[in-house]
Structure formats: C-alpha cells, structure tokens
Image (cartoon, rainbow, N blue to C red):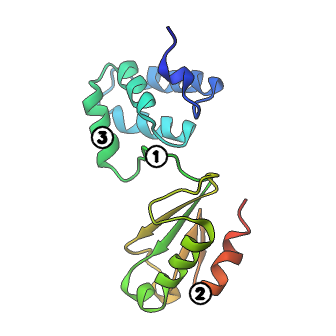
Amino acid sequence: MTSPILSHPDIAPEMIPRIDEILAEHKGSAGAVIPALRMCQDVVGYLPVELIDYISHGLNIPRSDVYGVATFYALFSLEPKGRHNVRACMGTACYVKGIKEVMNRIANKYRLASGGTTEDRRFSLEAVRCLGACGLAPVLVVDHDTYGGVSADQVVGILEKYE
C-alpha cells in the first residue's frame, strides 16, 4: 500500500526527500511542530491533510497536536495558495479611499473572493486589517511589492504584470 502523501496531486515525488529531511532534522526536538510545518509548507505551498498526517507520523506527535498548531496560526494554510499573494488593506484610511471598489474589481475580473484562490492558482486574495501604510491609501501588496493610491481602474493592470 502506498502512502497517501505519495498519491496527493500537489505533492510531487521529488518533494518527499526534502520533507523527510525536514522531519528527520526536527524529530525529538522541543518546539519542532511550528518550524517543521513552516518548512514543509514552503516545500508544498500549503498543508494538505495528508501532509499533516505525514508530519505527525514523522515527528511522532499526535495528529491532533499538529493539526491544532496548523489551524491556530495564520501563517499556515490548509488550502492551496496562488503563485501570487494579493493583500488588500481594509483599514479605515484604505476603506474610506476606495479599497472596497478595488476588491470588487478583483472579484469580478478574476472570480476571486477574499480568502480565496483563483482556479488556475495564479492569485490568492487576502483582506488584511492594516498594512501600516495609511499615507499611501488605498494600499495593495502583491507578493512583496507595495502599491499605493490604487484605484479600481488601475488594479487589473497591476495584477496583469504577475503571471
């Protein structure tokens, strides 16, 4: 019988040795769950349930403990993410200056709701409380690129730069 991790469509066979390396490196060490989850998520892109089970077994930690950590921290995702993470500031300054219209334009163009990922996994969209750039409102961050003064008319042009 093959391990469910080997048949998961998002876990390529070449990822397994790196995941095994991570688990071997952290097995038996105190506080291993968070760094192991983070590193495994970096390898796969998110934490499918099969990977959580594999991590649990590899670290010899109850599945419920590993799952509890993975679901508690916003750093971890149990759903696939897009190649590009789009974060829209929903803070007061950004909201007043039109971020809601920007979000609506993204939703209409890419069929993408806040917290979701496009079918082709090109974009993930996240509404955040504050990006700390109120003077640039409304603010959109794509991966590590910050865009200030973004309007609904500009947002599609900005996102089209990202394949």
- The secondary element bearing badge 1 is classed as loop
Seen at 45% across and 66% down, the residue is 114
Seen at 63% across and 72% down, the residue is 109
Q: Position of residue 78 (x, y in %)?
A: 42, 43
Does 136 sit above or below residue 116? below
Whichever of labels 2 and 3 marks the residue nearer the N terminus, that label is: 3
Looking at this view, name the residue that lies furthest to the top. Answer: 1
Seen at 49% across and 88% down, the residue is 98
Q: Are marks 2 and 3 in contact (CB under 8 Å)?
A: no
Q: Position of residue 113 (x, y in %)?
A: 48, 65
Neighbor class of circle 2 (other Cα within 10 Å; few <14, some 14-19, many 20+) is: many
Horizontal side of 5 relative to 28 (left or right) equals right
Q: Which of the two marks, 2 or 3, is nearer to us in this view?
A: 2
Q: Find the distance from the CA under tag 1 to the CA under tag 2.
A: 29 Å
- The secondary element bearing badge 2 is classed as loop
Q: Which mark is residue 69?
A: 3
Q: Find the distance from the CA under tag 2 to the CA under tag 3.
A: 37 Å
Residue type at numbered disc 1: Glu
Neighbor class of circle 3 (other Cα within 10 Å; few <14, some 14-19, many 20+) is: some
Looking at this view, name the residue that lies furthest to the bottom. Answer: 97
Whichever of labels 1 and 3 marks the residue nearer the N terminus, that label is: 3
Q: Find the distance from the CA under tag 1 to the CA under tag 3.
A: 15 Å
Whichever of labels 1 and 2 marks the residue nearer the N terminus, that label is: 1
Residue type at numbered disc 2: Ser
> In the depicted view, which residue is nearer to us: 15 or 38?
15
Q: Which mark is residue 151?
A: 2
Residue 130, quarter of the rendered image: bottom left
Residue type at numbered disc 3: Val
Residue 153, quarter of the rendered image: bottom right
Horizontal side of 93 relative to 42 (left or right) equals left
What residue is disc 1 on? Answer: 79
Neighbor class of circle 1 (other Cα within 10 Å; few <14, some 14-19, many 20+) is: some
